[in-house]
Amino acid sequence: MPKVKLTPIKQKTKKEEIKEIIKNPDDPLAQYPLRAFAYSNEVGAAVSAMPVWGKAAELLLWIPALMYLGADIYDKYRRGKEGDYTRASAAAAVQQAIFQALASVILPTTAVKVGQNIAGYTAKFDGSNLSATAKEETFNRLLDEFDNKNFAKGSVVASDGTVKTGFERVKERIIDEKLKPALASTRKDLKTEGIFSKIVRFFGHTKRPVASAKADESDVLTFFENQAKKLFEKQTILENSTREQIASDHPELLKLYDKAIKNSEKRAKLLIEKSPDYLVKKILNSEDKAQKTLIQAITKNYDSVEKRRILVKDKIDSARVVKELLKNPEYKASIENYATRLEIARTALRNYIKGKSIKLGLLKTAGGFIALGLLAVPIDNFVHKYIIKKFIEPGLETVESLANKNNNEPVDGRKIGPA
């Protein structure tokens, strides 16, 4: 029988076995799709730019990210430095915690925020010189003022005898008395803002007009005034026109009108019941000729500017006037019809303002997603190869060696000293 030469099987060293386990692990947490859960908080950061639901989504999307991070860190603790679950290692858990903090939280979130800011700056190119965030601040303030019924002003004779139109009074109230002081106060606070506050503001959210305060004030005021004027003009049209008139003269508003008409009668009843002072104010300031009989009925007993000013500020007195008017069938029909128009206008314009904010939010969200898509993998590699391998891993080994030396025990676990 011929001799067969057997080639000896090369035994793997312990170091090679460990490298193989770590390099090609049976670790579903390190592979997609589970690895994607680590970025759910970044998805939340990207969509946080969306109005209404963005911030809530950001908070909810932290849940899967935290669950993943906790599971991964615990798994690496149990897996240990050898990677075979034979000996748990706190150092391995610390190393993975640092990796996840940098590669799955801090750096990707920074990338998302930077991407949002870069995309937001493109909004300046429409001639406004304002970023998307500064414009969002404008629309948020306009929405607040609109909800607080500060667009209810009509033309009036001031105490000095001059006549102020409706928009001039709106401009005076929300720009001169509110916006300008808010910008000045924010600019003052930004000058003394600490580094910690800057970091919190970069990663978080603020209701203060920070982007507007950083922009040129003349640009901010011009943009705000233009948007407020458009809103005021649209409100006047919607409140004082029938659907047929809007379709004929202002077709660009018809879609807003038709969308807002749903449940408008129900909302009108609540307006009559809850805000009689606002209703009376709107009737007195109405440019609709159909409200002439109502205006005459109200001004019959409130025949001076001062009396009418007191009336619209007194909710109880306004409620009494409305209650009396509703007893007359003709007045009742006019009040209910006009209240319905007011609610259609209010809902339509709220949707108009939100639509503007949504477009800006989509722009910033797209920028965040693009940045995350481009930088997620490079960030992973950078943290693993440079930060972990060159700094964290050697540091942890040094600390572990010192701890073992103090305990009279080397790294391999054999005790030193007399038996």
Image (cartoon, grey):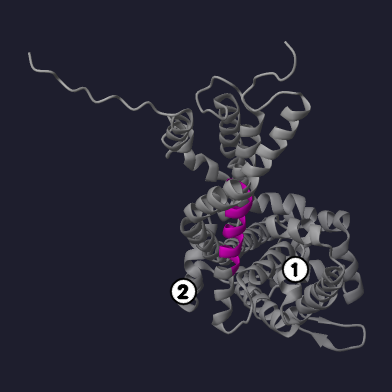
Residue farthest along the left direction in this orientation: 1
Residue 413: image x %, image y %? Answer: 64, 21
Residue 345: image x %, image y %? Answer: 61, 64
Asked if residue 303 is among those painted magenta in the image, a careful observer would answer: no
* Quadrant in which residue 2 is drawn: top left
Point out the frontmost of discs 2 and 1: 1
Residue 131 shown left or right of residue 43 in the figure? right
Amino acid identity at mark 2: Pro
Q: Secondary structure at mark 2?
A: helix
Residue 215: image x %, image y %? Answer: 71, 78
Residue contact at pointers 2 and 1, CB within 8 angstroms: no
Is the magenta region chiefly helix, strand or loop?
Answer: helix
**Residue placed at 78% from the left, 67% from the top?**
281
Magenta range: 104-117
Amino acid identity at mark 1: Val
- Marks 2 and 1, how far apart in space? 37 Å
Asked if residue 113 is among those painted magenta in the image, a careful observer would answer: yes
The residue that label 1 is drawn on is 210
Q: As displayed, is residue 107 above or below residue 93?
A: below
The residue that label 2 is drawn on is 251
**Residue placed at 87% from the left, 72% from the top?**
188
Q: Is residue 52 visible?
A: no
